[in-house]
Image: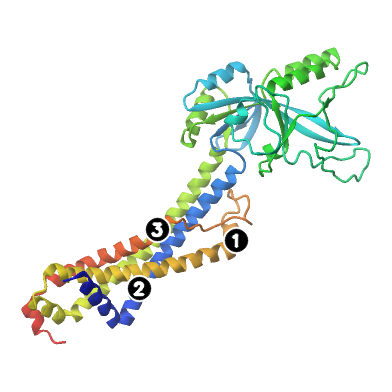
Amino acid sequence: MRISDLIKMGLRNLSRRKARTALTVTGVVIGTISIVVMISIGIGMNTNFKSQVMEQGSLTTINVERYANIMDEEGNYVNSKEQVMNDSLVEQIKGLEHVKAVAPIISTDATLHSGKYESYVQINAVDSSMFDEFDFPLLTSGSYPSAEDNHVIVFGSDTLMNFYNPYVRSSAQKEIDLNKDKVTLGFNRYQVDQKKKPFSLKINDFAVMNRTENYEYDYFCYMDINYFRSLFKKYTNTLKAEDRKKALASIENYGTIKITVDNIKNVTKVQDKIEELGYQTSSLAMYLEPMQKTSNMLQMVLGGIGAIAMLVSAINIANTMIMSIYERTKEIGIMKVLGCIIRDIKKLFLFEAGMIGLIGGIIGIILSYIGSWAINKFGQPLFKALLSTNYMYDMESAKFSVIPIWLPFLAAGFAILVGILSGYYPANRATKISAIEAMKTDG
């Protein structure tokens, strides 16, 4: 039997029993919708968790803070301890497997002045070579400090927006333009000796970061650590003797050490190694892991519901094909008498079952896209209630259902496979019908 004849006969047989075929296809449609929508919800949650965590920084970055939070076994805050973070620790971390780069950071407060306006910022001083190693944002102007030019101060996008007049109670905030406004930088942690002129640096070499929605980049300033030390030393020379010692001691230890790992899968391993050295660590990967566990668990539950729906449709297909065999027993007998080979009879029934799966799969995929749109449009109250104690930061912009390009093809292939497998037993049974007995059958 030619393939074209097989297709014509199969489609004709399906069209002759429109009501039964439609009901069977409906079962596949429901099963396909269940699988696609349920999986898309899991993927949507997982994608949303990951993207929102990544807005806070890189998933392959580990932080070691000078003041570490101590948690109990239940994850509740108990106390904090000061960790000694010096060059010796930096060298130890550099020697760990999977560590790509290590950036020790000195952090201190500073004041920016522009005429009668001022603003407070935190300065993070880091080796200039680390700006290329870590995921620092693009710049709207200027360039990052380098070994050749390390006198550049890099401003976060929002550090220039909140200048105010301290001598006016209801002073409106002012945004500063470094290209037009004169801005000076000073340190304010210790009192200046009244006999000496306060330290002040006129800012000429600068760069400004793009806005990232990452607090650490948007609201902090960065500079080369060697340049910072030279400026801070000039500042300490304006202090009283006792304060000078305290100021110099305050920058001997690092405030933060950032570590970049070669792969997100190795973040936990590196954290464990650092904690074996006696230091507390933190990373965004730590927060992502429980989110993904929640997402995966929900995805398994939802996928299970979809699988049950598809199993019901598979039983329905098998039942439809068996009923078709009983009704077409004489037809099968005639085909055998006319010399139709058994393999072609089997192919005919498998084709019909596969077509039911294909038609149901295509309709189900189309309706799944509509359902996905409806979930993203109107599902916020439901998901807000379900995830009110979870990790979703921005429910307004969250996509709760995401259908990747591969999912419709997978769903269609699965629907066809379910149809063929469901039709295998009926098709096999059709080939075993005796031609003589079939010819005796009425109908």
Image position, residue 425 (x, y; %)? 20, 67
Identity of the amino acid at label 3? Answer: Gly
Image position, residue 431 (x, y; %)? 13, 70
First in residue order: circle 3 vs circle 2: 2
Identity of the amino acid at label 2? Answer: Val
Q: Is residue 85 above or below residue 396?
A: above
In the picture, measured across the screen, residue 27 lies left or right of residue 174, that is left
First in residue order: circle 1 vs circle 2: 2
Which residue is label 2 attached to? 25
Q: In the figure, residue 441 lies in which quadrant?
A: bottom left
In the picture, measured across the screen, residue 46 lies left or right of residue 57, that is left
Q: CA distance from mark 3 to mark 2?
A: 21 Å
* Residue 318 seen in this snapshot: no
Q: In the figure, residue 179 lies in which quadrant?
A: top right
Image position, residue 418 (x, y; %)? 30, 63
Crowd class of label 2 (few under 14; some 14 to 19; many from 20; radius 10 Å)? many
Task: Using the image, tell me which numbered label, if any, was put on residue 304.
Answer: 3
- Contact (Cβ within 8 Å) of mark 1 with mark 2: no
Crowd class of label 1 (few under 14; some 14 to 19; many from 20; radius 10 Å)? some
